[in-house]
Image: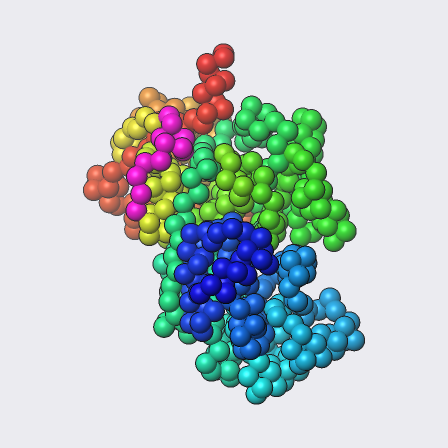
Amino acid sequence: MDACHDILRTVFGYPAFRGPQQAIVEHVAEGGDALVLMPTGGGKSLCYQIPAIARQQAGHGITLVISPLIALMHDQVGALHEAGVSAAFLNSTLTGDEAYQIEQQLLRGEITLLYAAPERVSNARFLALLDSLFERGKLGLFAIDEAHCVSQWGHDFRPDYRNLTVLHERYPGIPRIALTATADDLTRADILERLQLEDARAFVSSFDRPNIRYTIVEKKDATLQLLRFIEREHEGEAGIVYCQSRKKVEDMAQTLVDAGIKALPYHAGLDQKVRQTNQDRFLREDGIVMVATIAFGMGIDKPDVRFVAHLDMPKNIEGYYQETGRAGRDGLPAQAWMGYGLQDVVNQRRMIDESPAGEEFKQVMRGKLDALLGLAEATDCRRVRLLSYFGEPSQPCGNCDNCINPPEIWDGTDAARKLLSTIYRIQQMSGISFGAGHLMDIVRGKKTDKVAQFGHDTLSTFGLGASFSETQLRGVLRQLIATGAVGLHKVAMDNGHSFDTLELTEGSRAVLKGEVQVGLRESASGPAERKSKRSA
Ligand code: ADP
Ligand code: ZN
């Protein structure tokens, strides 16, 4: 359809469509339903904005865009105004009078794209407005952005998205387009089912971001590792550092500032004004490093973010991919760097175990965590792993740590069996279970006060693993916990703290019997450390 191409050129000023945009835009402009899976930065907005303009021009009326974030709506509407497109939003930031003015403009047919939050769709006044547009044949298209929010398997579940089926049921025949950058099979199936889009045509783009180099390192001194990474490879460049807790965000931002890096903190607990200022500075100034929780990032379109670093492991691959996808939107080389360690695995496992969710949900979450751990422990191409998680076959990329510096692999099965039988013997002898540090001391034959106090130096496995380094044993233990062959048991102490003790599980037996192999990377050392070894 030439009309769409004209709009691309005259309204948005781009000479050509990118990837699958043209097929999507034409399908939707002609009234088809669509599910669009495209990585962050792929150009999803035009996929509904151009059909919206085309359908308005053809007399079909307005496009309603459902978007989960107010900040995102503001940006989009602002950009559309700059392009000379009539757009507006209805959300909680408007006064009653402002909302009324917009409603009147809508009814007069003066607006092409209307942005609204999902909860609007449960609002009687809003539905009455849509009713009258529908009756006049002036509802042209529904666009559902960030459609993965409908799925509880995704990382951004928003219950309000579940009500969006109202649009389909109350206004049959109006075309719908749902868009997301999150697309594992489970989420995809959930979107289709929950939004009743089974008959929609699916447009699946490649999720590869070839300009992003993936590196995952084992944490030793995480702060030092991060500092080296930034100073050696990204001095003076813009980046995002993700941490799990608000406190850690603030501490890490300060640490970076002390090291002479222009860093700012961002998390939901900061004052709204501070958050806004920090975000604005990140967008406008050069070379700012934003240290943030995952509250930061959705809708941030900064093209020259040169690196995204994770100091704590995310929950799953979808989250990891969405967050790392914020690097290198301009197509120039960028890096995704992640540190992970035993404590991350313990924390994530515990969060799942202790969540109030049902057992089925927990099983799915554990599976997703295992997939991410599989990626972290992988000895082969990271990108092949990532893309295959999204159902996309590929070849080794030459642009990830494992491709550039293939790691050495060793068989950890023997060490795993020594750890497991020691856990068993401690339990037999003392009737209680202990934590990772104590276990390691026994297996490595270190006669600490605690070991002596409990007589654990008399266990037959004492010192049996003396040939293994502590790092190696930690790596093995991490895998055993990750795969459920070792269970965690939380013990509360009198002082209000708690710690995790280790226990055998159903899954232990297969490893003890030698039915399952435990393959490990040789003390995962990232590029930063290799360099330091060389210079030492
Ligand atoms: P997404 O929502 O998929 O993350 P956006 O819609 O924000 O991506 O688009 C990412 C960037 O690519 C934006 O700066 C946008 O203007 C640009 N872009 C999208 N489509 C095209 C195109 N056909 N030609 C040139 N630039 C494009
Ligand atoms: Zn690779």
Write the start and end of the magenta stretch as one range.
Answer: 393-405
- Residue lying furthest bottom in this view? 135
User: Measured along the vertical axis of the image, is residue 76 above or below residue 334?
Assistant: below
Q: Main secondary structure of the magenta part?
A: loop
Q: Is residue 200 left or right of residue 500?
A: left
Closer to the camera in the image, 19 or 231: 19
Residue 126, located in which quarter of the rendered image?
bottom right
Q: Is residue 397 magenta?
A: yes
Residue in the picture at 62% in, 74% down? 120
Residue 394 shows in this picture: yes
Q: Is residue 152 left or right of residue 473?
A: right
User: Measured along the vertical axis of the image, is residue 267 above or below residue 60?
Assistant: above
Q: Position of residue 279 (x, y in %)?
A: 69, 46
Residue in the picture at 66% in, 48% down? 267
Residue 503 shows in this picture: no
Residue in the picture at 46% in, 25% down? 527
Q: How is the rendered protein coloured?
A: rainbow
Closer to the camera in the image, 512 or 405: 405
User: Measured along the vertical axis of the image, is residue 94 above or below residue 47?
Assistant: below
Q: Position of residue 292 (x, y in %)?
A: 62, 44
Q: Position of residue 275 (x, y in %)?
A: 71, 49
Closer to the camera in the image, 233 or 292: 233
Q: Is residue 473 magenta?
A: no
Q: What is the number of callouts on the image?
A: 0
- Residue lying furthest top in this view? 536
Closer to the camera in the image, 12 or 463: 12
Q: Quadrant of the N terminus?
A: bottom left
Q: Position of residue 96 (x, y in %)?
A: 77, 75
Q: Is residue 250 left or right of residue 424?
A: right
Residue in the picture at 53% in, 43% down? 329
